[in-house]
Image (cartoon, rainbow, N blue to C red):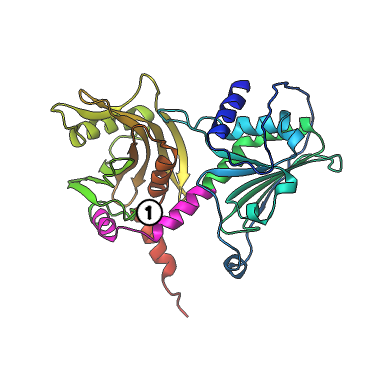
């Protein structure tokens, strides 16, 4: 916890954007108390579309969260607990970067200028509350906005609530950021790439217009923005579903290494892309996307037998139920000397936008006019 707070202090010094806090003083006294509490999770949905249209647009940078908290609570256990949650390192990045960027703000400084922030945590610790409560809300002061309000009767119950339900809070903000990016991508789609991909794989995916340079082969498609500073790539490949062990970590990573070795080669003869296993083993998770099973892999790639190149990658592998084929969609980043969190998160939003044949057909069926 102490290391996380020191790291956060260094980041704040680097980009000081603090409201009504001239200095940040941290002490590291951790008080541990046991409190029984009942957590109420409420999801307040946004109002009607007319209300949304009347709201101003959100402000702030991607994955930035404004934390509204009393200064004394901020520099004590409640504040340190939030820092531990929000400032933890994001998974599968070659250099440490926080999950969220934190902007502290005192309640008296929470003016209209800050109420349009894209992500907000509002804390209120007071004896007037009988138990901790976490409330999730959207679009209160701006659109599309995500807000978490945490109330508690005392510091210890606040800390316990954040520690126990911190993952839910993070998931809420990360999901909202991804949905914002997906909506943005829809306005800037490379229609030619979208059509080519649908012709090859039968899937629909929102490839941003910044991606222009493509390589097309049988059952393989690779497109890049070819940016020399922050390069982002999307790779799609498919193969028949014949093995019941396909959707396992070992099988999918072996398939990835095989496909990349053959198709993604470096400038030096004999060099090729592969997966980094030694220093950061890939993370495999089973998730659900559009109501269907999905194997998610997050990890690091590197170039073998060539230049010192590498970076993060993120992939979804799913089953095309209609054609009985396995489809993998992967995004990877190459940005030496640059921060990579936002770039790989942007690629995640592209990966999530994919619709498989069974999903496309389902949408068509829903849109059919019913018989009178």
Q: Which residue occupies the foreground of this view, 79 or 175?
A: 79
- At horizontal 40% and vertical 34% (from top left) the residue drawn is 297
- At horizontal 22% and vertical 49% (from top left) the residue drawn is 213
Q: Which residue occupies the foreground of this view, 368 or 310?
A: 310
Is residue 187 magenta-colored?
yes
- Circle 1 SS class: loop
**Is residue 208 left or right of 145 when viewed as pictured?**
left
The segment highlighted magenta reads 176-198
Q: Quadrant of residue 273?
A: top left
Q: Residue 48's spot in the image, x, y percent?
A: 61, 67
Q: Residue 248's spot in the image, x, y percent?
A: 38, 31
Question: Which residue position holds label 1?
Answer: 355
Q: Which residue occupies the foreground of this view, 136 or 287?
A: 136
Q: Quadrant of residue 310?
A: top left
Residue 163 visible? The answer is no
Residue 249 visible? The answer is yes
Q: Residue 315's spot in the image, x, y percent?
A: 37, 39
Name above or below for residue 156 compared with residue 107.
above
**Is residue 183 left or right of 38 when viewed as pictured?**
left
Furthest residue toward left: 269
Furthest residue toward bottom: 372
Q: Quadrant of the N terminus?
A: top right
**Is residue 90 left or right of 53 when viewed as pictured?**
left
Q: Quadrant of residue 165?
A: top right
């Amino acid at each position: 916890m102490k290391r996380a707070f020191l790291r956060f202090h260094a980041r704040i010094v680097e980009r000081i954007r603090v409201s009504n806090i001239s200095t940040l003083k941290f002490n590291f006294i951790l008080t541990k108390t046991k409190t029984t509490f009942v957590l109420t999770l409420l999801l307040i949905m946004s109002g009607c579309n007319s209300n949304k249209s009347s709201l101003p647009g959100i402000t702030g940078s991607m994955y930035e969260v404004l934390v509204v908290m009393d200064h004394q609570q901020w520099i004590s256990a409640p504040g340190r607990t939030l820092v531990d949650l929000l400032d933890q390192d994001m998974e599968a990045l070659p250099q440490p970067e926080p999950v969220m960027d934190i902007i502290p703000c005192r309640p008296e400084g929470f003016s209209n200028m800050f109420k349009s922030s894209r992500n907000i945590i509002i804390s209120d610790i007071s004896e007037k509350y009988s138990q901790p409560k976490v409330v999730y809300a959207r679009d209160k002061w701006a659109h599309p906005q995500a807000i978490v309000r945490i109330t508690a009767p005392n510091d210890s119950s606040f800390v316990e609530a954040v520690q126990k339900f911190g993952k839910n809070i993070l998931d809420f903000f990360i999901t909202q950021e991804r949905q914002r990016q997906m909506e943005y991508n829809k306005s800037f789609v490379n229609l030619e790439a979208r059509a080519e991909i649908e012709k090859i794989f039968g899937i629909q995916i929102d490839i941003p217009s910044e991606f222009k340079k493509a390589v097309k082969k049988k059952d393989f498609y690779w497109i890049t923005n070819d940016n020399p500073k922050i390069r982002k790539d999307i790779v799609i490949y498919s193969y028949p579903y014949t093995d019941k062990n396909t959707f396992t970590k070992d099988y999918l990573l072996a398939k990835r290494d095989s496909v990349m070795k053959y198709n993604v080669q470096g400038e030096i003869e004999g060099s090729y892309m592969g997966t980094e296993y030694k220093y950061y083993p890939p993370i495999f998770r089973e998730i659900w996307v559009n109501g269907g099973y999905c194997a998610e892999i997050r990890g690091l790639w590197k170039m073998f037998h060539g230049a010192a190149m590498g970076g993060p990658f993120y992939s979804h592998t799913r089953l095309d139920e209609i054609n009985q084929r396995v489809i993998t969609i992967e995004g990877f980043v190459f940005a030496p000397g640059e921060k990579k969190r936002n770039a790989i998160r942007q690629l995640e939003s592209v990966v999530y936008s994919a619709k498989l044949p069974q999903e496309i057909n389902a949408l068509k069926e829903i849109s059919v006019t019913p018989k009178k």
